[in-house]
Each structure stands twice: as structure tokens, then as C-alpha cells.
Amino acid sequence: MLSFDLLLFSANSHRYDFEYEEDDDEDGGDVDIENKYYNAKQMKASDPEGAIEEFLGVPALEKEKGDWGFKGLKQAIKLEFKLGLYDKVRSFWKVS
């Protein structure tokens, strides 16, 4: 997240100077994961098979299992089911 402070305002020149500071969050790596997920979502209508591959790539980007990986798998399974790729859908189920 970016925060900025107004350092100088000159009424004569209408000049604004900003100082930008980046917050170093632990979630910084999530941006790439989130982008991959939403890019895959945009591909669903035009290239569903490509979208499935993109969705399946989301969990691999996570260091620990998390929400984005789950969402990616869920979207991949929904697309496979919609496309009638039932054997692929079943490959995600584990019987214990």
C-alpha cells in the first residue's frame, strides 16, 4: 500500500510534492498470486482450457496452502465439470 504526505504546496505555482512510502507487508507475494487468479478468470470465456491451466498454477505459487490456491482449484474444477472433463474432476478427489 502506498501512503503519501503532502510536503509542499505553493499557492503561486500550484505545485504539489509528494513523498511515497511503500509498506512492506508479508502479503507482498500475494499480489502475483492474485494477478494470476484474476488473469485466469478473464480467460474463462475465451480460452477455458488455458484458464484451467492458469488456475491450476495458482496453488504452486503459494508457500503455504491458502485462500488463493483453494480458489484456483475450485475454479479449475468448476470449468472442467462445465466442459465435461469428468475424469479430470475426479482426479482431485482423494479417498482416505
Image (spheres, rainbow, N blue to C red):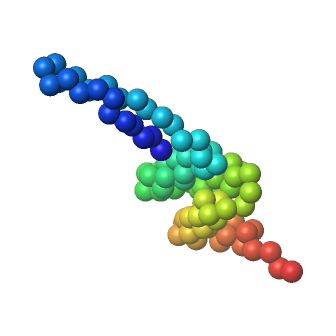
Q: Residue at x 51, y 37 (%)?
A: 22
Tell me if residue 87 can be seen: no
Q: Is residue 72 depicted above or below 35 in this figure?
A: below
Q: Quadrant of residue 92?
A: bottom right
Instruction: Give how far across and how far down residue 93 sits, in percent.
Output: 75, 74
Q: Residue at x 32, y 33 (%)?
A: 6
In the displayed structure, does residue 41 sit left or right of residue 56? Answer: left
Q: Quadrant of the C terminus?
A: bottom right
Tell me if residue 19 can be seen: yes
Q: Residue at x 13, y 20 (%)?
A: 12
User: How many numbered marks does the figure carry?
Assistant: 0
Q: Is residue 63 depicted above or below 2 in this figure?
A: below
| Front residue of this view, candidates 42 and 21 | 21
Residue lying furthest right: 96
In the displayed structure, does residue 95 sit left or right of residue 5? Answer: right
Residue lying furthest bottom: 96
Q: Is residue 47 depicted above or below 86 in this figure?
A: above
Instruction: Give how far across and how far down residue 79 sits, in percent.
Output: 55, 65
Q: Residue at x 44, y 52 (%)?
A: 42
| Front residue of this view, candidates 45 and 25 | 25
Instruction: Give how far across and how far down residue 60 sits, in percent.
Output: 71, 51
Q: Is residue 72 depicted above or below 86 in this figure?
A: above
